[in-house]
């Protein structure tokens, strides 16, 4: 009888455990990686990161998991990248402007009007020059997982109309905290004001700044168009982003997980490019309906004004601009 009661008790425990898992409990993934980004839920990049998480889990049969932390939940980009250098299992979105702190020549990727469009920047990522830059970045502790994410074409929202570079004089325009974007905005005629993305909306509403620049879906998702009612279509930067993780952490991953992580990142990048292009068109119409005045500018005037930016970086390898342009011709 004792044996029967024991077996019944064991059977009950097994059935209970089965019911628990059937009710939604899941086993923990073998490889869990945090993904940090500044953008808010619902923006194109957030949708693309969710797609990346789905693809990664699918390719690894559940062994890999991306845990998403939007809206700067894990701190500023600089904070997150410093955690990476220590070997943390974190991925974040970055670009040449931020990589320039570690490999100066990378900064040119965020130069104004560098190519004809974003496809030129995608092309650069497949060149021997980019491979060399990536190797140097790995020596600094970072590993680029993917380079085909179109963050968007960057434009401005301002509190007063802007038609020419001269109209920017005296206007404080928020830019990311990297040298080349700061310099480019100054060269175009404005007063660049670097700050974290999360600080921009209150700074616009209180008059600390007069405008901001970013891809249109980001400007809308962050509600920057509410206090700044003019959308200035400068298209001054085809912002192609890279997702980066710790080189030390990546090196420890099994080959199949590495492959799944990189492949799913590239596939999600294709999803991102398609999503952001659709969102740009739709968002302009939303802005118009919400009282935003859209201003088409003479891009050649802004391009001509901004070109001097490429002469302001003596730490770059001599002839860098011409070398990059040679790959684009």
Image (cartoon, helix red, strand yellow):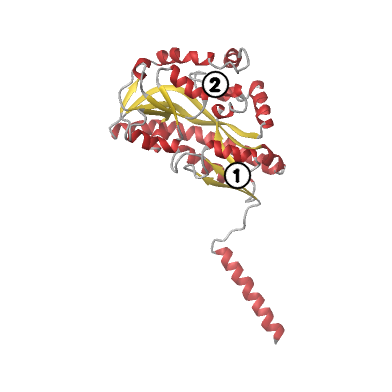
- Horizontal and vertical percent for residue 290? 29, 35
Question: At 29% from the left edge and 34% from the top edge, which residue is drawn?
Answer: 289
Residue 87 sits above or below residue 329 on the image = below
User: Does residue 285 appear left or right of residue 42 in this picture?
Assistant: left
Q: Quadrant of the N terminus?
A: bottom right
- Horizontal and vertical percent for residue 113? 48, 18
* Residue 103 falls in image quadrant: top right
Most foreground residue, 92 or 178 = 178
Look at mark 1 in the image and give the residue it sits on.
Answer: 56
Secondary structure type for disc 2: helix
Q: Marks 1 and 2: in contact by CB < 8 Å? A: no
Question: At 64% from the left edge and 47% from the top edge, which residue is drawn?
Answer: 60
Disc 1 crowd, CA 10 A, few/some/many (<14, 14-19, 20+): many
Secondary structure type for disc 1: helix
* Residue 190 falls in image quadrant: top left
Q: Quadrant of the C terminus?
A: top right
- Horizontal and vertical percent for residue 196? 46, 35
Residue 11 sits above or below residue 22 on the image = below
Question: At 57% from the left edge and 61% from the top edge, which residue is drawn?
Answer: 25
Residue 5 sits above or below residue 63 on the image = below
Residue 133 sits above or below residue 57 on the image = above
Disc 2 crowd, CA 10 A, few/some/many (<14, 14-19, 20+): some
Label annotation for residue 293: none
If you read the primary sequence from the N terminus, does the residue marked by circle 2 or circle 1 appear first?
A: 1
Q: How many tags in the picture? A: 2
- Horizontal and vertical percent for residue 248? 69, 39
Look at mark 2 in the image and give the residue it sits on.
Answer: 120
Most foreground residue, 116 or 38 = 38
């Amino acid at each position: 009888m004792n044996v029967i009661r024991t077996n019944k008790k064991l059977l009950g425990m097994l059935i209970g455990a089965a019911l628990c898992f059937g009710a939604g409990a899941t086993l923990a993934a073998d490889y869990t990686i945090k993904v940090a980004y500044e953008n808010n839920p619902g923006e194109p990049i957030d949708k693309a990161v969710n797609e990346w998480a789905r693809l990664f889990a699918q390719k690894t049969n559940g062994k890999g998991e991306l845990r998403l932390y939007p809206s700067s939940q894990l701190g500023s980009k600089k904070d997150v990248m410093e955690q990476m250098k220590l070997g943390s299992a974190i991925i974040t979105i970055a670009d040449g402007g931020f990589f320039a702190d570690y490999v100066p020549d990378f900064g040119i990727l965020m130069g104004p009007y560098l190519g004809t469009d974003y496809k030129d920047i995608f092309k650069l990522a497949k060149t021997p020059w980019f491979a060399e830059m990536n190797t140097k970045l790995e020596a600094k502790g970072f590993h680029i997982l993917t380079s085909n994410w179109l963050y968007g074409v960057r434009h401005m929202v301002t509190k007063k109309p802007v038609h020419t570079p001269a109209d920017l004089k005296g206007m404080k325009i928020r830019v990311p905290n990297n040298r080349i974007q700061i310099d480019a905005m100054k060269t175009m005629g404005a007063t660049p004001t670097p700050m974290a993305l999360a600080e921009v909306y209150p700074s616009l509403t209180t008059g600390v700044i007069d405008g901001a620049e970013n891809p249109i879906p980001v400007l809308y998702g962050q509600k920057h168009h509410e206090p700044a009612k003019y959308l200035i279509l400068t298209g001054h930067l085809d912002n192609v982003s890279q997702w980066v993780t710790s080189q030390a952490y990546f090196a420890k991953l099994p080959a199949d997980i590495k492959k799944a992580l990189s492949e799913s990142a590239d596939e999600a990048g294709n999803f991102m490019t398609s999503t952001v292009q659709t969102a740009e068109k739709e968002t302009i119409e939303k802005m118009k309906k919400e009282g935003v005045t859209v201003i088409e500018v003479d891009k050649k005037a802004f391009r001509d004004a901004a070109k001097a930016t490429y002469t302001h970086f003596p730490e770059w390898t001599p002839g860098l601009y011409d070398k990059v342009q040679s790959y684009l011709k």
